[in-house]
Image (cartoon, helix red, strand yellow):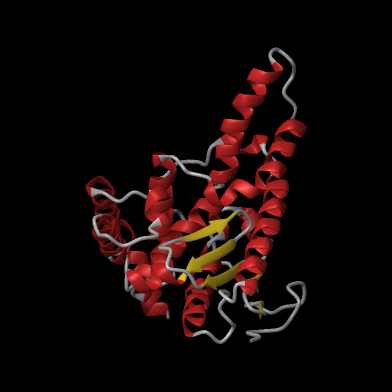
Amino acid sequence: MCLLCLPPSVAPSSPWSARRAFLLAAGASAAAPVLAQVDVGSASSLRKLVPAETLENSAAQQYQQMLQQAKAQRALAPAGHPQLQRLHAIAKRLIPHAAPWNDRARQWRWEVNLIGSSQVNAFCMPGGKIAFYTGILDQLKLTDDEAAMIMGHEMAHALREHARERIAKTQGTNLALRLGSQLLGLGDLGNAAASLGGQLLTLQFSRADESDADLVGLELAARAGYQPSAAVSLWQKMGNATGSKQGGLAFLSTHPSGPARIRALEQNVPKVQGLYEAARRGG
């Protein structure tokens, strides 16, 4: 299905195109930068030790490999799948608000795909490559607002370049130990970023990264007109799922729920409530 089959370079204000996934040149329709309402500070400068383009290219290759495997297993949702169309609609509202958090997002070719699996999981790889598993939508019975909170959270990891920072920290330390007093060059970390492409799906973020993504994702969703309180109900559902006997909760192994996380979201919901109300009035 084609949402708007025009090349990004000549597209009008909402340059959409689609094959099984959709691609969006975010810069052409990005919302005007406005001051963030949540307080997350600046992204770590350590991430600059790893070339962003190298990591994004590696992520794109792994993403395509994953899609090919899913297609071979007949697990890749077709363009007309109702749940995939639902995710496309959510992403279409979220992505225009991404660029103020990371200017590189203006050039990203965003993709969203749905994979048939009982796993409760979703992710966004560097460069805007998003995937949801049907398990997270079905087992948690997510509303659109809650699905938007998950998508916003995963987009925030990419926008704040948490994977880039994590690789810089872990590989930088390893290389420094290995090279001793030798000068550590960017080429070493660039090679590390390229070689770690196969590990991006299993990369675990820190507690600070998770808190950061919670708040940035909350604001992205609010600006897109999704109910901020859904962030709280989402993580309450996550907490209930953690204590259940359901299998395949891969998302929860890397995104632990708990009272502290929910309290932090509750404290920040009022900060973005005005953004949500303005978006609803404007929509």
| Residue 247 placement: quadrant | bottom left
* Drawn side of residue 111 relative to residue 10, left or right: left
In the foreground, 23 or 278? 23
One can see residue 25 in this view: no
Residue 62 horizontal/vertical position (percent): 66, 56
The quarter in which the N terminus is drawn is: bottom right
- Residue 134 visible? The answer is yes
Whether 191 is drawn above or below 88: the answer is: above
Left or right: residue 36 compared with residue 162? left
**What residue sits 42% from the left and 44% below the top?**
40
x and y, in percent, of residue 116 in the image: 50, 73
Q: Where is 256 relative to 109, above or below?
A: above
Residue drawn at x 47%, y 68% as measured from the top left = 133
35 left or right of 278? Answer: right
Residue 118: x and y in percent read 42, 68
**Residue 126: x %, y % from top left:** 61, 53
Residue under the image location 58 percent in, 75 percent down: 76
